[in-house]
Amino acid sequence: DAGVIQSPRHEVTEMGQEVTLRCKPISGHDYLFWYRQTMMRGLELLIYFNNNVPIDDSGMPEDRFSAKMPNASFSTLKIQPSEPRDSAVYFCASTLPGTANTGELFFGEGSRLTVL
Amino acid sequence: GESVGLHLPTLSVQEGDNSIINCAYSNSASDYFIWYKQESGKGPQFIIDIRSNMDKRQGQRVTVLLNKTVKHLSLQIAATQPGDSAVYFCAELPSMDEKLTFGTGTRLTIIP
């Protein structure tokens, strides 16, 4: 079975450029989460959706970050303009309603972003 | 603020031995506690969870212990194998919430 699919796996860009990260959740999963992982701050929740609706975006660092989920099979995380401190691995995860409140998430392999 | 933390950042264990990874938490309102494994270059992978009304749960080669008195969580891995080498995260989920909070992680290295 296909897991959570993220693209690109790696991206190197220059400061000021727009970055778009993409995620395809597991089919049938109603919940989608975006996490960021850095050495300094570990795994941080940025935003999550339920049935394509953003539920909590309190983890989004600032207005430069935005996320959308236009349909049940696709989500994007956009950074515009990007800054060097945005360099991190960004993970997308999905889960079912029954496992969203037990903490069992299914993670993608991540998108490693480097902003020069 | 409340947080989930780990006692040891690194742990090396001889192959075949048992390993214990520890975690301290501070949110007494958490309902579920979860362990994740993250191999190099991959996303975190769910291992096992335990609900706050339990003190022990066993899986295949893994056991999670929960001590609510001292707010301590541990993951025991029996008969470790090279494939167990990874970073292990504890995480907690408050009651009636869907936002998982991760600890900082412990790197487990299995020595052949």
Image (spheres, coloured by chain):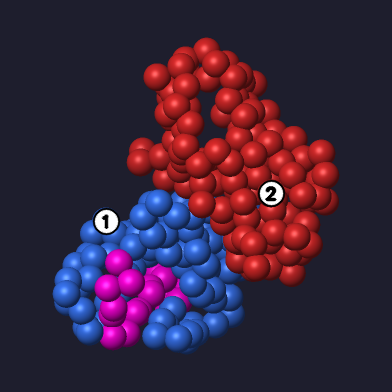
- Chain designation of label 1: B
| Residue depicted at 40% across the width and 51% down the height | B41
| Residue depicted at 73% across the width and 55% down the height | A31
Q: Amino acid at mark 2?
A: Lys
Magenta region: B65-85
Q: Can residue A75 be seen at all in this image of the molecule?
A: yes
SS at badge 1: loop
Which residue in the structure is indicated by mark 2?
Answer: A24
| Residue depicted at 74% across the width and 69% down the height | A98
Q: Colour of chain B?
A: blue
Label 2 neighbour load within 10 Å: few <14, some 14-19, many 20+ = many
- Would you say A116 lies left or right of B46 here? left
- Chain designation of label 2: A
- Would you say B20 lies left or right of A102 here? left
Where's residue A86, x and y in %?
A: 47, 27
Where's residue B87, x and y in %?
A: 35, 60
**Chain appearing in red on the rendered image:** A
Q: Which mark is residue B9?
A: 1
SS at badge 2: strand
